[in-house]
Image: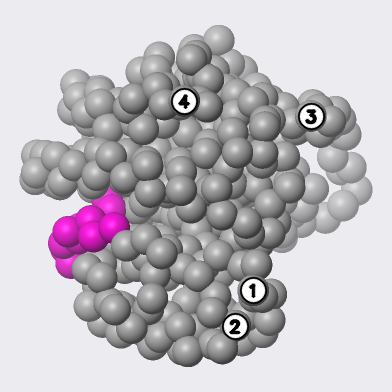
Amino acid sequence: MKENKSGEQSVSHTKQEIEGQPELWQSVFDLIQTQQKEIKAFLEPILNKNGLEIILTGAGSSAFVGEAAQGLVQKNSKRTTRAIATTDLVTHPELFFPKDHPVLLISFARSGNSPESVETVNLADSFCSEIFHLVITCNKEGELFKYTRANTQTALAILLPEKANDKSLAMTGSFTSMLLSILLISDLKNLESHKLELQRIMNQGNLLLDSAKAFKEISAKYFERVVFLGSGPMLAIARECHLKLQELTDGQIICKHDSFLGFRHGPRAVTNEQTLLVYLFSPSDHVYKYELDLAKSIAKDPRTIECVNIGRSEDKALHSCLNIDLNLNSNQQLNIVPATLVGQIMGYYKSLQLGLNPDNPSISGAISRVVQGVKIYEYPEKIEHDS
């Protein structure tokens, strides 16, 4: 993907932002390392509070950051952790915000200006008797960043490097940077030990980028549906890949996502001869057994449904049109970060193949870089919530 091949735009923010991610991850790591003492000083007393609950939130792709990180944040912090989109919190705060125990609200936001994200912070302050905010954002001019500057006793912002603030419509570097940040912060005490893993995911990201020719060839194929499958934290990455390909093709390619085991329970009905399956395999040998069983089952389908395999060495029984072995390590936590590039690269090339502009693929203007048209209504005080 690093050469300007015929048919590609000479200048594309999307292309540059996808390609720049491995280097960006190093910058993110350096940032967290530099601010390690400040982050620890803010979070340590909060994490020691009895009954603390962590809520990870954002809108759209930013919400998927929380979904991908939820299990690992809970494992690393040993605190009950839930991922709840701002789009749910704004409409039903009474169902999610507790008053009887402290809450750490971790907000992910590229711009920090989405109406739902700003309102979620306001609602949390209103509903929760003891609330703290960690904002991970890419925009120092955003409303969420400004909020932390005005509430320094209860709020802290992690302002990511400027290159994480994507100029294109689709979130690429911003997504992986926010995801990497929260994974590192949740395991801050072991930050030094993650240096080797950082180099590993950078190598994995570059391996995916170096496979651009193969992804481009796949994008030239005719398919009307793409299904991304993942397990555990990789399920949310499958969801993000689903969104990325769908929005970069302006909805011309219909995408789905599911877990490998969940796909058997009805959703598999979506597959037909024009379906491409993308398997985001787990580094866990135990989990991979379940995943491989499903993949082999689909490979026996007489309709010859094509697949792309990401992560593991090639299994001839799967008859894949592309297999990329990422040399996964079973102890790896950060492998979900580079896996995100799969949907980005496929989306970029399919967008070009359809004659769209990847930087702004929405012909109708139905989607925009920062969501438009959302009106925030004052929450009715008469609605009772759990006290």
The residue labelled by disc 2 is 303
| 204 and 53: which is toward the camera | 204
Mark 4 or 1, closer to the camera: 4
Amino acid of disc 3: Ile
189 part of magenta stretch:
no
Q: Secondary structure at mark 2?
A: loop
Point out the stretch of residues depicted in magenta: 324-335
| 187 and 164: which is toward the camera | 164
Mark 2 or 4, closer to the camera: 4
Which of the numbered marks, if any, corresponds to residue 273?
Answer: 1
| Residue at the far top in the pictured view | 141
Residue at the (64%, 26%) spot, across then down: 357
Which of the numbered marks, if any, corresponds to residue 363?
Answer: 3
Q: Secondary structure at mark 1?
A: loop
The reply to whether callout 2 and callout 1 are in contact (CB within 8 Å) is yes
Q: Secondary structure at mark 3?
A: loop
What is the quadrant of the N terminus in the image? Answer: top left
From the viewer's perspective, is residue 99 above or below residue 189?
A: below
Q: Position of residue 238 (x, y in %)?
A: 50, 58
So how many labels did they put on this image? 4
Label 1: few (<14), some (14–19) or many (≥20) C-alpha neighbours in 10 Å? some
Give the distance between the C-alpha atoms of the residues marked 2 and 4, in whole angstroms: 34 Å
Instruction: Say whether disc 4 or disc 1 marks the residue closer to the N-terminus.
Output: 4
**Residue 227, image quadrant:** bottom right
Mark 3 or 4, closer to the camera: 4
Instruction: Say whether disc 3 or disc 4 marks the residue closer to the N-terminus.
Output: 4
From the viewer's perspective, is residue 180 above or below residue 9?
A: below
The residue labelled by disc 4 is 6
| 240 and 380: which is toward the camera | 240
